[in-house]
């Protein structure tokens, strides 16, 4: 009898684990996926075109809230946990629920889920969402290109739309973003690479994506999502830690896995963090993985016209995932507002509508900052309405994209940018040249 299995996920790692391990494996029967973290990704089916010949009807995707009921009614033998950026305590609460319902609880590691590339793979992962993976990935891509290497960034999945259409996507221009109807969250990760002349791949089937990328580049750059580990076997593992959240490097899943596997640590944001917190993170990383190289780095912020902020009542918009399941209360936009003399950071919660108001109820720590939630057209319009209802003089947007390309804002906007700058030695360039220079 095949082992009846549910995969718990959030439209990313769950689909990858299925494709790599379960799809053509008759020893298992995946009877359902469950979905959480991301709005409106349940109620679909993993389509038969992607699920393979063992699943001619595809596989249903249910809300995670139905997990206990599903285990009992579907006769489930095991549940596989396959999403990221959650505390160890959270994982064990889910394990307890599953085991109390009568099923086994399973975590799948790199050995059974990673794919082998014919090209060198540099992976950028993190301890938590919002640590600074994106600017670290951009810095790595810049160095590799300056070394004369062709590089493609393969981005952790965000398939929130038509899964068949999103099976293997290649982005080389803004027109590609429009053609695939990318969400704000997708654009935040893809646009900065495109601005730097780096091709981006993403989608659902990461073996197909890998083989396409290998045909046109010299080096694969895994640009991780949340704090997940790489889908590909790495030749160099770079892990970013955040001293604004000291201690999280040993309390979150699978961030601690990344820490213990790292070749290089980047302790980011040392320019804005408490020095004692930086030291605490350094000592923690060294205890967990004494063989990894440690680099300290800053994320300096740049604003088009800092003088426009002084004396203004401002609405601050930050990257959505960083504020929600990343549990940060502020980001670069808040820092810019304080640094450049805003008279007041206006609380957007009284103006929030629809799913934006629901986001505040679910993630209460977000406070007087607006997360740039845009997982689909409806939510983007609700974000637009929330911004336009706010009684402020100026909007400070610290998302990695020009948000005015996707929503219409009825007040002036100042955009905040941030890039990675290593401090002291060694640098990422030193390490990449030593590893890949030949």
Image: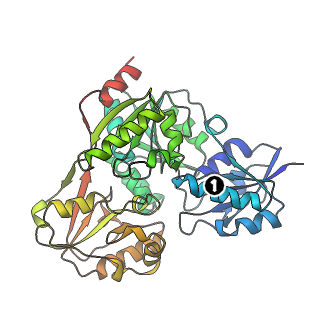
User: Element under label 1?
Assistant: helix
Q: How many marks?
A: 1
Toward the viewer: 80 or 138? 80
Provide residue 311's location: percent of width, then percent of height. 11, 71
Residue 137, can we see it? no
In the rendered image of this protein, does residue 269 appear above or below residue 367?
A: above
Left or right side of 362 for 76 = right
* Colouring convention used in this rendered image of the protein: rainbow
In the rendered image of this protein, does residue 290 appear above or below residue 128?
A: above
Residue 411, can we see it? yes
In the rendered image of this protein, does residue 282 appear above or below residue 73?
A: above
Q: Quadrant of residue 312?
A: bottom left
Provide residue 23's location: percent of width, then percent of height. 73, 46
Q: Quadrant of residue 67?
A: bottom right
Provide residue 209's location: percent of width, then percent of height. 55, 42
Provide residue 308's location: percent of width, then percent of height. 12, 66
**Is the residue marked by circle 1 packed among few (<14), some (14-19), or many (20+) residues within 10 Å?**
few
**Which quadrant of the rendered structure holds the C terminus?**
top left
Q: Which residue is at a point 55% across and 26% down the rendered structure image?
A: 118
Q: Which residue is mark 1?
A: 92
Residue extending furthest toward the right: 1
Toward the viewer: 212 or 352? 352
Left or right side of 199 for 106 = right
């Amino acid at each position: 009898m095949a082992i009846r299995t549910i995969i718990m996920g959030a439209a990313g790692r769950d689909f990858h684990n299925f494709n790599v391990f379960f799809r053509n494996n008759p020893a298992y029967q995946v009877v359902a996926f469950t979905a959480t973290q991301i709005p409106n990704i349940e109620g679909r089916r993993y389509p038969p075109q992607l699920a393979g010949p063992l699943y001619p009807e595809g596989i249903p995707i249910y809300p995670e809230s139905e997990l206990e009921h599903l285990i009992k009614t579907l006769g489930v033998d095991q549940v596989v946990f396959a999403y990221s950026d959650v505390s160890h305590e959270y994982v064990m609460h889910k394990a307890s629920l599953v085991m109390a319902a009568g099923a086994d609880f399973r975590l799948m590691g790199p050995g059974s889920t990673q794919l082998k590339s014919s090209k060198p793979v540099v992976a950028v992962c993190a301890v938590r969402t919002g640590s600074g993976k994106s600017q670290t990935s951009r810095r790595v891509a810049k160095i590799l290109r300056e070394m004369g290497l062709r590089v493609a960034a393969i981005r952790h999945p965000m398939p929130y739309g038509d899964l068949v259409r999103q099976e293997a996507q290649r982005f080389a221009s803004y027109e590609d973003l429009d053609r695939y109807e990318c969400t704000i969250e997708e654009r935040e990760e893809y646009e900065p690479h495109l601005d730097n002349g780096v091709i981006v791949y993403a989608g659902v089937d990461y073996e197909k994506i890998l083989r396409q990328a290998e045909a046109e580049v010299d080096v694969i750059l895994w640009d991780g999502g949340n704090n997940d580990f790489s889908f590909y076997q790495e030749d160099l593992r770079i892990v970013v830690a955040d001293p604004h959240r000291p201690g999280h490097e040993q309390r979150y899943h699978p961030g601690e896995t990344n820490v213990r596997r790292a070749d290089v640590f980047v302790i980011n944001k040392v320019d804005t963090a408490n020095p004692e917190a930086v030291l605490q993170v350094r000592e923690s990383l060294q205890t967990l993985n004494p063989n990894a190289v440690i680099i300290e780095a800053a994320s300096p912020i740049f604003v088009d016209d800092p003088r426009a902020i002084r004396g203004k009542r401002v609405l601050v918009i930050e990257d959505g995932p960083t504020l929600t399941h990343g549990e940060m209360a502020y980001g670069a936009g808040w820092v810019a507002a304080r640094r450049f003399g805003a008279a007041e950071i206006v609380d957007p919660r009284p103006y929030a509508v629809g799913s934006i108001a629901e986001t505040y109820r679910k993630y209460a720590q977000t406070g007087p900052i607006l997360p740039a939630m845009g997982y689909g057209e409806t939510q983007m319009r609700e974000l637009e309405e929330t911004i336009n209802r706010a009684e402020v003089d100026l909007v400070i947007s610290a998302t990695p994209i020009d948000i005015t390309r996707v929503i219409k804002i009825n007040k002036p906007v100042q955009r905040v940018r941030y890039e990675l700058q290593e401090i002291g030695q060694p640098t990422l360039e030193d390490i990449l040249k030593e590893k890949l220079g030949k």
